[in-house]
Image (tube, rainbow, N blue to C red):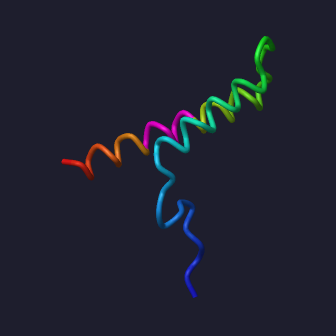
């Protein structure tokens, strides 16, 4: 039996990542992000960027 993959078989589209980022920021409007929240924001941005690159290469 193989170990589960770190990434899902079908990655989330960039629109889903973008909405997750918007909701994350909206829920923290007017506050300074904690270290953990900053890390979560970086993770969301990284996912969004990866999704954009994947969509771009699939369209080519």
Position of 14 with respect to 36 (left or right) is left
Query: In this orientation, which residue lies closer to the viewer: 54 or 34?
Result: 54
Query: In this orientation, which residue lies closer to the viewer: 44 or 16?
Result: 16
- Looking at the rendering, which quadrant does residue 23 occupy? top right
Task: Name the outermost residue toward the left.
Answer: 60
User: Considering only vertical position in the picture, is 43 above or below 27?
Assistant: below
Identify the residue shown where x is 48% and y is 57%.
Answer: 11
How many marks do you count on the picture? 0
Instruction: Please provide percent x and percent y for residue 35.
Output: 76, 26
Q: Which residues are magenta?
A: 45-50
Position of 50 with respect to 21 (left or right) is left
- Is 32 magenta? The answer is no
- Is 47 magenta? The answer is yes
Q: Main secondary structure of the magenta part?
A: helix
Identify the residue shown where x is 78% and y is 27%.
Answer: 27
Identify the image quadrant of the N terminus: bottom right
Task: Name the outermost residue toward the bottom.
Answer: 1
Instruction: Please provide percent x and percent y for residue 12.
Output: 51, 53
Instruction: Please provide percent x and percent y for residue 4.
Output: 59, 73
Instruction: Please provide percent x and percent y for residue 54.
Output: 35, 48
Identify the residue shown where x is 55% and y is 44%.
Answer: 16
Identify the residue shown where x is 77% and y is 32%.
Answer: 36
């Amino acid at each position: 039996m193989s170990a589960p993959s770190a990434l899902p078989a079908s990655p989330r589209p960039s629109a889903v990542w973008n909405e997750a980022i918007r909701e994350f920021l909206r829920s923290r409007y007017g506050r300074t992000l904690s270290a953990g929240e900053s890390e979560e924001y970086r993770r969301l941005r990284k996912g969004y960027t990866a999704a954009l690159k994947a969509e771009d290469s699939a369209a080519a």
